[in-house]
Image (spheres, rainbow, N blue to C red):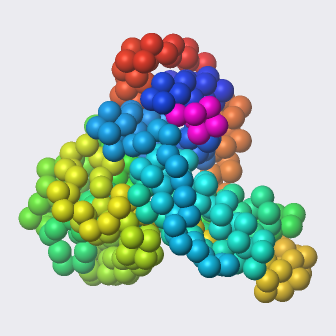
Amino acid sequence: MTTNYSYKELYNFAKKIFLAIGCSDQDAIQATNTLLSADLRGVDSHGIARLIGYVRLWESKRVNPKPNITVVHETPSTAVVDGDKGLGLVVGPAAMKIAMEKAKNVGTGWVAVKNSNHYGIAGYHSMMALEEDMIGFSFTNASPLVAPTFGKERMLGTNPISVAIPAKNEPPFVADMATTTAANGKLEILQRKNEQAPLGWVQDKEGNPSTDPGAVKDGGALLPLGGSPKNAGHKGYILGSVVDILSGVLSGANYGPWVPPFVSFLPVSDNPVGEGLGHFFGAMRVDAFRPKEDFLKHMDQWIGRFRVTESINNEKKVKIPGDPERMFEKERKENGIPLLKPVVDSLKNLSEKFDVDLPNPN
């Protein structure tokens, strides 16, 4: 059972909560923009439902609401950014802007980030590059909830990959995916709905396949993209590892099982190997490779041809990455964002804690 709330009302509520924990007005706006982009795009696992999680990190002094975000190493095309324990919702966009500025100057820009926190949906950051007709890349490591192929230990995060590519008249190509079969937030949604998980999403603490969405909390693990070894789960394990190395090992952040978790049921490591959580961003100027108009024209052609692919089922057409999210955004801007009762209850908790009025449903 869901209740719809207007985007504007939820935006005002979230911004007030970020202000209440000490964020500047500018950072509260940025954090809210980043967070609610997930709800608008239909990624309910990473939107307003996670607001209480960011507050929990602040309460445990793991988030600095007024970070001094600095470049600690750079070349003309690369940089390492220290997020000063800031909200990843703020640190991520700041780092992506640095990557884009470098791309403007020398064609490409690559920025590794350490000492940050959970940054919301990967797609928000990669899509920033579209504003400049650039190709954007966004990666992050995350709470260690994933067992490598043939393993029982939780060693990796859901470690998403997002790539955003502009077109001329067609909407952009936007890939935004976890390197696991499903993100942990999807399990949280299933738990709120009292539904089972599909086989291939999780394993129990002994490494057996499970359909219990609470299996990870009970010592089990998420499975890499592909699921079981028989279904090529090793490929998801490899992709997640690449993201972890670029985000953590390259930047000087924590990596693997040492990544500080966002989820409340995992402890923070007593022996960190780096600083905070890590991200990796890239921006590429199209005309660093070929004339921009030529590229955009051919992207239109690429997208157009894929759209008319002969389908197996005439009722289900082939979609371009980014299409479902655009449909969600259009519908939710008009009709509001649906929230499950446990999410509404968590917002009521924040409303009382910070004396901020919770908006009325639509």
* Quarter the C terminus occupies: top right
The quadrant in which residue 28 appears is: top right
Would residue 333 be found to the left or right of residue 255 on screen?
right
Residue drawn where x is 43% and y is 63% of the image: 114
Q: Position of residue 222 (x, y in %)?
A: 27, 61
Most frequent secondary structure within the magenta stretch: helix
Residue 115 lies, with reference to residue 112, above or below; the image says above
* Quarter the N terminus occupies: top left
Residue 253 lies, with reference to residue 46, above or below; the image says below
Q: Position of residue 260 (x, y in %)?
A: 30, 55
As for residue 27 lying within the magenta part, the answer is yes
Would residue 57 be found to the left or right of residue 106 on screen?
left
Q: Which residues are magenta?
A: 23-29
Residue drawn where x is 67% and y is 60% of the image: 97
In front: 7, or 322?
7
Q: Total of numbered circles in the picture?
A: 0
Residue drawn where x is 29% and y is 47% of the image: 263
In front: 43, or 274?
274
Would residue 323 be found to the left or right of residue 341 on screen?
right
Q: Position of residue 341 (x, y in %)?
A: 39, 25
Q: Position of residue 261 (x, y in %)?
A: 30, 53
Residue drawn where x is 56% and y is 64% of the image: 71
